[in-house]
Image (cartoon, helix red, strand yellow):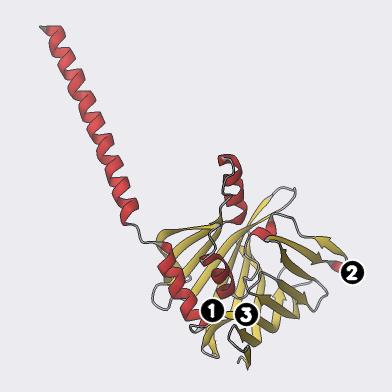
């Protein structure tokens, strides 16, 4: 009789544990099923930042402060980005970078001190290249089937209530290990203002070939939006690397070209 009582108690305890685990699984499944889809947030941001048009290119000029070099060096810069993934950055100090896409495969070339060129680490062109102008980045990844997207949640960034969305490249048909590696080097976090739908922060990581920090976190902060032909453009951009300011950028002019039956463009001097 005593043994029967023990067996009953053990069975009841097992049933309770199973019930708790099943309930937790159901709650998790329900939460996943009811989480907002990421694409509507990105479509709203794209519509707002492009004025409902498709941008073909953005040509930008302005001033840049490079922190930590010769007591914060100031210089001019120019940046061009196109909806085919091509970008080019030139800084008055002689540094710069260009990226192209050939057959869907991105590549890049950097320009260092003395005009010496070097290839951009092959992993880095996989992440955002048009971060000066995130509308082009969102546009290129929003409809591409090889990019996955997820809604992370509501957060606070730079004093704004934002919706946090992640995007990354999928290695379709690859092993789980390879797919995880591709996700790690292509992951982008986009934080858009809940009310205005404008980008507040874009974050990704640089991937170095070696050294003490092979993965370097980067955050791009956007502020002081002004309108250029019905398109809000952030005049001020701060780039943080490893959590500290690296670049401070102020746009002085922006020229936009749109995809239409006949291409049109407009230039605006920002104040």
Earlier-in-chain disc, 1 versus 3: 3
Percent position of residue 260, x then y: 58, 85
| Image quarter in which the C terminus is found | bottom right
Seen from this angle, which residue lies furthest front? 261
Mark 1 and mark 2 residues within 8 Å of each other at the beta carbon: no
Residue at image mark 3: 56
**Disc 3 or disc 2, which is closer to the eye?**
3
Mark 1 → mark 3, Cα distance in angstroms = 23 Å
Residue at image mark 1: 223
Where disc 1 sits, the SS reads strand
Where disc 2 sits, the SS reads helix
Earlier-in-chain disc, 3 versus 2: 3
Where disc 3 sits, the SS reads strand
Please report the residue visible at 50 percent of the width from the left and 72 percent of the height from the top.
200
Q: Can residue 50 be seen from the camera position used here?
A: yes
Is 162 drawn above or below residue 256 in the view shown?
above
Please report the residue visible at 76 percent of the width from the left and 60 percent of the height from the top.
120
Q: Crowding near pointer 2: few (<14 within 10 Å), some, many (20+)?
A: few
Foreground pick, 188 / 107: 107
Residue at image mark 2: 114
Mark 1 and mark 3 residues within 8 Å of each other at the beta carbon: no
Percent position of residue 53, x then y: 52, 83
Mark 1 → mark 2, Cα distance in angstroms = 33 Å
| In this picture, residue 102 sits left or right of residue 38 | right
Is 218 drawn above or below residue 86 in the view shown?
above
Percent position of residue 158, x then y: 48, 71
Residue 11 in which image quadrant: top left
């Amino acid at each position: 009789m005593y043994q029967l009582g023990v067996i009953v108690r053990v069975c009841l305890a097992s049933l309770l544990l199973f019930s708790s685990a099943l309930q937790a699984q159901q709650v998790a499944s329900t939460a996943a099923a009811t989480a907002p889809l990421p694409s509507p947030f990105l479509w709203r941001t794209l519509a707002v930042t492009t004025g409902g048009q498709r941008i073909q290119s953005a040509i930008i000029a302005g001033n840049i402060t490079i922190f930590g070099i010769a007591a914060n060096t100031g210089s001019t810069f120019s940046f061009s980005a196109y909806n085919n993934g091509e970008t080019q950055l030139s800084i008055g100090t002689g540094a710069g970078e260009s990226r192209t896409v050939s057959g869907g495969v991105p590549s890049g070339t950097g320009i260092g001190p003395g005009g010496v060129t070097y290839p951009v680490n092959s992993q880095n062109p996989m992440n955002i290249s048009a971060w000066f102008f995130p509308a082009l980045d969102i546009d290129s990844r929003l409809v591409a089937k090889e990019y996955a997207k997820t809604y992370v949640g509501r957060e606070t960034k730079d004093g704004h209530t934002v919706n946090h969305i992640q995007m990354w490249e999928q290695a379709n048909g690859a092993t789980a290990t390879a797919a995880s590696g591709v996700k790690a080097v292509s992951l982008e976090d986009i934080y858009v203002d809940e009310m205005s739908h404008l980008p507040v922060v874009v974050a990704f990581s640089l991937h170095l070939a070696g050294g003490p920090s092979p993965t370097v976190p980067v955050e791009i902060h956007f502020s002081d939006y002004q309108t250029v032909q019905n398109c809000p453009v952030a005049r001020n951009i701060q780039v943080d690397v490893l959590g500290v300011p690296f670049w401070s950028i102020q746009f002085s002019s922006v020229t936009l070209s749109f995809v239409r039956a006949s291409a049109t463009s407009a230039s605006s001097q920002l104040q």
